[in-house]
Amino acid sequence: MEWTSKKIRETFLDFYKRKDHQIVASAPMVVKNDPTLMFVNAGMNQFKEYFLGDSEPKNVRVSDTQKCLRVSGKHNDLEEVGVDTYHHTMFEMLGNWSFGDYFKKEAIEWAWELLTEVYKLDKDRIYISVFAGDKNDNLELDGESKEIWKGLIDETRILECDRKDNFWEMGETGPCGPCSEIHVDLRSEEERAQIDGKSLVNEDHPQVVEIWNLVFIQYNRKANGELVDLPNKHIDTGMGFERLAMALQNKKSNYDTDIFMPLINKVVSISGKTYGATDSKQDVAIRVIADHVRAISFSIADGQLPSNIGAGYVIRRILRRAIRYGYSFLALNEPFVNKLVEVLVAEMGGQFPEIKLQQSLITKVILEEEESFLRTLEKGISRFENYAAKNQDKNIDGKFAFELYDTFGFPIDLTELLASEKGLHVDMQEFLNCLQQQKDRSRAATIIKTDDW
Ligand code: SER
């Protein structure tokens, strides 16, 4: 069978429907009613109050695909995006939940059944991790999960990992618990023969990746750091849809799946560049753009316009990052991101009608942002030209580079590129000092204390 992304998504939801789950819609990605979050960073966010026992769910078994954005707060993947091949700003998380109903046994056995009997992933390429325990929190090894897994997979394929990887928390406070992760090894047979996949689990290998996290929610982390038992035990699972597609479509990168290729092909046709050739910066730029247009478009569809504060500023920065990469590495100096919206709507409008309904607004907002930011970039370039004409001492002052960065949104690599074209260097040490000072200032200004929810 050909596992198109559409088929993968439908199969997941259908599987849990048959296990008596109610299929619900994704919550909007922009969070308006939780002071601890700007964007939805996990499928469980919309169910937080059920875990805490603050309200009663209509159905104790639920499943969905949730739009998530990990660009701020505890879960922030922005710097990896585009540089590697398996992190995203916005991604879909396929999940199933039990609110005080089934627990570890069903969650684990069903995940295994779906992966190996329905999707038919090769069992020999799967590794499992369970929580090893933690002295500080006074928690022991999750022996129960390990025993359940031992009934399904050879014990040698089970790893015990510490809290960094196997204790999931939504944020600094809130529902949490030990988790068990499912990893797949997508390397070639030759590579697998040389290095044991087990040693590459949780080592940031692009083809040995976590695809599914099964969380056993049983505590609430209070603002003082203390763990308190919740009234009930719950299941919260999240599978990376794009990574699963990479595995089922036999690709080496999420971007090579049918989720991203239509967007990549469009960037290639607009820019006249190639993807997957030798210029890695060009490839990174194409990936950055294909990724970012999704995050920006869905945020706008969910009601968050780019702006200068809070969540709007995060969206503006993501959009500017896409424009800058296009400008610097693909020679795109006319608005282009807005032209990708049409492709995105054609690919995702079926599952997420909000993007179709808002298509013209999204396109217009992106176009306006692009026009204004490209003008800013031009002003910055002319300032750079003036500076370089006056200072021919082979060094671009780090403070000046920082001003370009801070006021004109100039990425430092663009300044370096302009400098090198004139045979000049940027004083990077001074630039980094200025950057650090700014980070310290903004960290001090944005520490928001939230009480227990
Ligand atoms: N909450 C867990 C995660 O985001 C599982 O859904 O990984």
Image (spheres, rainbow, N blue to C red):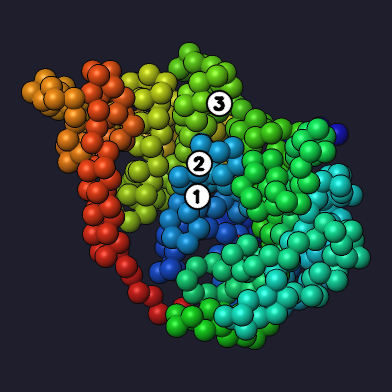
Q: Residue 398 carries which label?
A: none
Q: Residues within 10 Å of mark 1 (few under 14, many from 20)?
A: some
Q: Whole-Å distance between the Cαs marked 2 and 1?
A: 7 Å
| Residue plotted at (38% across, 75% down) | 450
Instruction: Name the quadrant containing residue 400.
Output: top left
Asked if labels 1 and 2 touch by Cβ distance under 8 angstroms, the answer is: yes
Q: Is mark 1 within 8 Å of ligand 1?
A: no
Task: Read off the residue under disc 2.
Answer: 81
Image height of 131 relative to 95, above or below: below
What SS does tag 2 mark? loop
Among the two numbered marks 3 and 1 on one chain, the one whose residue lies closer to the N terminus: 1
Which amino acid does the dot numbered 1 rest on?
Asp
Q: Which mark is residue 264?
A: 3
Residue lying at the far top in this picture: please name it: 272
Task: Read off the residue under disc 1.
Answer: 77
What SS does tag 1 mark? loop
What SS does tag 3 mark? helix
Image height of 206 relative to 134, above or below: above
Q: Does the residue labelled 3 lie within 8 Å of ligand 1?
A: no
Instruction: Name the quadrant containing residue 213.
Output: bottom right
Which amino acid does the dot numbered 3 rest on?
Ile
Which amino acid does the dot numbered 2 rest on?
Val
Instruction: Name the quadrant containing residue 319.
Output: top left
Among the two numbered marks 3 and 2 on one chain, the one whose residue lies closer to the N terminus: 2
